[in-house]
Every structure is written in C-alpha cells, then in structure tokens.
Amino acid sequence: MSIATVQLLLDKTKDFSIEETLAFLANEYPNQVVFSTSFGQEDQVITDLIGKNQLPIAVFTLDTGRLFQETYDVFHKTLKKYKTEIKTYFPDTTAVEALLNQKGPNSFYESVENRKECCFIRKVAPLTKALQGNAIWITGLRAEQSENRSDLNFFEYDAHFDIIKFNPLLKWTLKEVEEYLEKNNVPQNSLHKQGFVSIGCAPCTRAILPGEDIRAGRWSWESSHKECGLHQK
C-alpha cells in the first residue's frame, strides 16, 4: 500500500457511487477489506450498505469494556437485522489489569497523557490487531465532524497502520446521515435522540448542548484535538 495506490483508487472510483466503490474494493482486494464500526450513526449507514448489498466485506468492532448499554443494544439489533458476523476485538487483559492496578479506574480524567494511554490500551492496540493483513480500512469519518478531519480525502494512506482508509461518507452532512437511517429503518443508538452525537466509552462521552461542536461531548473536561489515536487526522 502506498500514496500512489491512493491516487489510483481516487482516479478509478471518481465517478462511482458509494455502493459501486464498496463493491469494487471488495472485488479488487478479496478478503482484505474491513469495516470498523462503533455503531454510531455514520457506521450504521455503512453497515446497511454492506448488509443489504451482501458485500464480502468483514465487519469488526472494538469492545473497550466501558461502552454504554445502549451501544450493546444497537449492536444486538444490528446482528439480528443483517444476520452477519461482527467480529469483536477486546483489549489485552494483562494491559488493562496493569493500568487499573497502577493508576486506578479513572486515571483518564487526570491528564491528556493518561487518557491517551487508556485509549491506546483499550482501542488502538486492539485496532492494530484487527487491521493486520488487510489492505483497505473503511471508516465512518465525515469532514464536518471536526476541524481535524476537514481536510481528509475519500482515500487516505494511514502510515501509522500501513493501510489505505476509505471514507465513503466524507462529504455527508449529519442531516443526510439521519435521513438515510430513518428512510431505511436502520437500527440506531437510542442515545442519539438524547443529544449524543459522537458516542464512545461511557465515562468519556456526554450529550452536547445546542450550538456546541459535534466533538464537544468527547473528553469534555480537556482541551485537545478530541481524538483517541484511531485516526491520526
């Protein structure tokens, strides 16, 4: 995988719909295309596109051990609706035990460094394992989610994971996402109706207030780029 491959994919798929691009990738890179879902609104759109078109794309999720019950609820509903495997990756037990033994269960509130350490153990390390051996990583990133994501392209080379990311919903607005979900009767996390836009681990997520930035509800006690390390941009 390389930057040259990214440009080739951009050229080949420039006139494709999202469904056509997903099918093209699945055919071009058999058994090497994966989609990571956290069961948020954007991810549910992509899950629906993969599921209803029966595309041979592996779907996986990261269970950090600190998710909302509402997230597990939509996980279960999604399995029932699409009847497809969603492979689950957990953090390393020894690493989690060491973190809690040394710093306690709430160390992430104490500093950005501690929070990133928790994110690394619970999310980044399992993601690294999940992406190994794959060529394309499909994400639910949208440009308007944060300033840090505003300059993304549909295809990006992620040097950290040595993989090409495909961001099919990059130019979608939140309204377009919500309309798609309603029109297609896609399972949704009930927290979205309570002001939660971006949903992660329960201790690290809150509902946003009217006028607040979309990412304001993530790690609201700190001033940072509001990223956990899964996406470097």
Image (cartoon, helix red, strand yellow):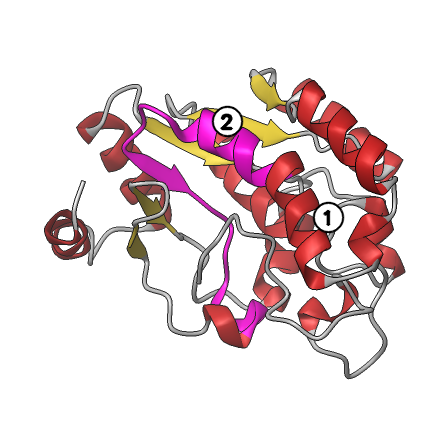
Query: Viewed as shown, does residue 42 lie left or right of 111?
Result: left
Q: Which residues are magenta?
A: 123-146
- Check residue 59 in the rendering and tell me which mark sits there, or answer none: 2
* Vertical arrangement, residue 110 with respect to residue 29, above or below: below
* Vertical arrangement, residue 74 with respect to residue 5, above or below: above
Mark 2 to mark 1 CA distance (whole Å): 18 Å
Q: Position of residue 64 (x, y in %)?
A: 71, 33
Q: Secondary structure at mark 2?
A: strand
Q: Residue at x 77, y 45 (%)?
A: 201
Q: Residue at x 31, y 37 (%)?
A: 136
Q: Secondary structure at mark 1?
A: loop
- Check residue 200 in the rendering and tell me which mark sits there, or answer none: 1
Residue sticking out furthest to the bottom? 211
Query: Viewed as shown, does residue 122 lie left or right of 8?
Result: right
* Vertical arrangement, residue 103 with respect to residue 114, above or below: above
**Which part of the image, by quadrant, shows the C terminus?**
bottom left
Query: Viewed as shown, does residue 179 lie left or right of 137?
Result: right
Disc on the earlier residue, 2 or 1: 2
Q: Residue at x 50, y 27 (%)?
A: 59
Q: Residue at x 36, y 47 (%)?
A: 160
Asked if residue 136 is among those painted magenta in the image, a careful observer would answer yes
Q: Quadrant of residue 103?
A: top right
Q: Callout 1, which amino acid?
A: Gly
Q: Callout 2, which amino acid?
A: Val
* Vertical arrangement, residue 221 with respect to residue 186, above or below: below
